[in-house]
């Protein structure tokens, strides 16, 4: 009988297994996490340091696919899978990471392709390390809040944040309520040249119009009855950062005075005669898209152009479905020890219900829902298996917007209209709100698209906002 020829796949597996057997004694003793996957993305080596970081048993991980061990990860976000797909190394990638105890870590890792004797790709290896606290404390970055996301749009904004933060330019952040604008401001301050100075925050919507000027610029004795020499926010933020939240709620008259500060770098305390130097980096936030706020008369256009040198747009949670699972699991691990120590994980049924929500209150609402559910969890199991919404949150339980709502009932005309709404919604969303691009993708004239949107009750779609 002739010998049975081995397949190229089995040859590559044998080469990889031989390589792992040779290197395992070295990797086992390292304090750095080291993992090896085969050409299909399944773990063939996972050292003890990796298990300690992830809270997993190394023996149970072997044979598991990368995406099984980290279920919220997408293929394009995994350095190991990218390394396998491209056959090229990924060097010094830094990501926010949730440790085994629920702590937030900055994790640097590198992945390299592994090749056999004849150059065929047999797998990939990744070596990682937690970024040293000592290096970060030098610049005050240990106070920077870690912002977790797996959404490409959010990750793009975070990369821009790192670039903008290193400058002294004004920064404008806009996003819906609850998306984390203050976190962006705190992170920008922590990574700025002014990180050792103060960060002073003011919610413009919370201060009466009559007090806003004195709150910002301070007062001098005698400016009005009972007035004393008192520092305002600009003086208190000297050498640091002033964060003005909901600037679109600031009266237009005050916006003009703020514009003058940005133009000449000085301000005049209420009742004062001598201008004071404003050595402050300004970060402003709006819960509306700037163009919408301008159109509604809530934001001066000239102030917008002064602030718009560096601008960030935070996408709402409903546009970041992968972040729902990531953040929900983080909140459970972080809050359960204090609210309900019996709970150690998030159940599949609870996760499915969370993912079916539209989240009008964004991350803040998700965090509150998890906390409420932990408090009211009265089961013996270690999984949080029931999500408790407040009575007035019933509207959040909506079918995801990228799925048609029709269940197959209704007349043919109604079902076709529902399907058409779904297709138009999907095209406009994928085009980022650009109706011309959406019409092109649907292969219809723009005027036809507008007419069908009006007929189907989709007038709420607006022309695209300026990509700030």
Image (tube, rainbow, N blue to C red):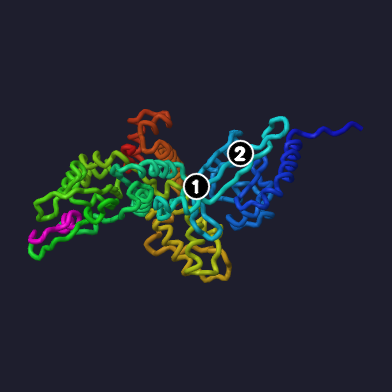
What range of the chain is rendered magenta?
A: 210-223
276 sits left or right of 172 in the view: left
Helix, strand or loop status at disc 2: strand
The residue to which callout 1 is attached is 95
Relative depth, front residue between 357 and 404: 357
Mark closer to the chain start, 1 or 2 = 1
| Image quarter in which the N terminus is found | top right
State the CA–CA distance, disc 1 to disc 2: 17 Å
Give me the residue at 51% from left, 63% from top. Answer: 386
- SS at badge 1: strand
What is the crowding at mark 1: few (fewer than 14 residues within 10 Å), some, or many (at least 20)? some
Residue 288 in the image: state x and y as whole percent: 29, 47
Which residue is rendered at x = 24% and y = 59% of the image? Answer: 206
- Residue 341 visible in the displayed image: yes
Which residue does the numbered mark 2 point to in the structure image? 112
**Cβ–Cβ under 8 Å for marks 1 and 2:** no
| Magenta stretch holds residue 217 | yes
The spot of residue 374 in percent (x, y) is: 48, 66
User: Is 432 rendered above or below residue 352?
Assistant: above
């Amino acid at each position: 009988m002739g010998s049975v020829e081995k397949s190229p796949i089995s040859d590559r597996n044998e080469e990889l297994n031989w390589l792992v057997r040779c290197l395992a004694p070295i990797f086992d003793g390292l304090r750095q996490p080291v993992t090896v996957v085969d050409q299909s993305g399944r773990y063939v080596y996972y050292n003890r340091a990796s298990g300690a970081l992830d809270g997993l048993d190394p023996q149970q991980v072997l044979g598991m696919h990368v995406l099984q061990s980290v279920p919220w990860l997408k293929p394009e976000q995994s350095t190991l899978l990218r390394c396998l797909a491209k056959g090229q190394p990924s060097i010094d990638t830094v990501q926010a990471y949730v440790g085994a105890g629920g702590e937030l870590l900055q994790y640097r890792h590198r992945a390299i392709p592994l090749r056999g004797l004849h150059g065929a790709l047999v797998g990939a290896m990744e070596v990682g390390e937690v970024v040293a606290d000592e290096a970060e404390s030098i610049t005050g970055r240990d106070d920077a809040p870690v912002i977790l996301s797996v959404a490409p749009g959010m990750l793009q904004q975070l990369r821009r944040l790192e670039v903008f933060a290193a400058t002294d330019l004004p920064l404008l952040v806009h996003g819906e309520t609850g998306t984390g604008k203050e976190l962006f401001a705190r992170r920008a301050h922590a990574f700025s040249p002014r990180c050792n100075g103060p960060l002073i925050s003011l919610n413009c919507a919370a201060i009466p119009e009559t007090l806003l000027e004195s709150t910002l610029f301070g007062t001098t004795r005698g400016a009005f009855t009972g007035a004393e020499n008192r520092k305002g926010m600009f003086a208190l933020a000297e050498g640091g950062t002033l964060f003005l939240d909901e600037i679109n709620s600031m009266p237009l008259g005050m916006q003009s005075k703020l514009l003058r500060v940005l133009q000449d770098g000085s301000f005049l305390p209420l009742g004062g005669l001598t201008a004071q130097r404003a050595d402050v980096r300004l970060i402003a936030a709006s819960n509306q898209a700037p163009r919408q706020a301008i159109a509604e008369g809530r934001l001066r256009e000239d102030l917008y152009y002064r602030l718009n040198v560096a601008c960030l747009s935070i996408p709402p949670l409903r546009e970041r479905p992968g972040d729902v699972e990531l953040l929900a699991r983080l909140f459970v691990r972080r809050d359960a020890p204090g609210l309900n120590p019996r709970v150690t994980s998030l159940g599949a049924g609870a996760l499915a219900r969370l993912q079916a929500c539209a989240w009008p209150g964004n991350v803040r609402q998700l965090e509150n829902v998890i906390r409420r559910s932990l408090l009211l969890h009265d089961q013996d199991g270690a999984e949080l298996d029931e999500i408790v919404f407040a009575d007035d949150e019933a509207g959040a339980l909506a079918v995801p917007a990228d799925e048609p709502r029709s269940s197959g009932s209704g007349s043919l005309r109604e079902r076709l209209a529902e399907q058409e709404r779904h297709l138009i919604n999907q095209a406009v969303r994928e085009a980022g709100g650009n109706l011309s691009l959406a019409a092109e993708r649907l292969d219809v004239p723009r005027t036809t698209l507008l007419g069908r949107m009006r007929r189907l009750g989709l007038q709420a779609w607006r022309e695209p906002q300026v990509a700030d």
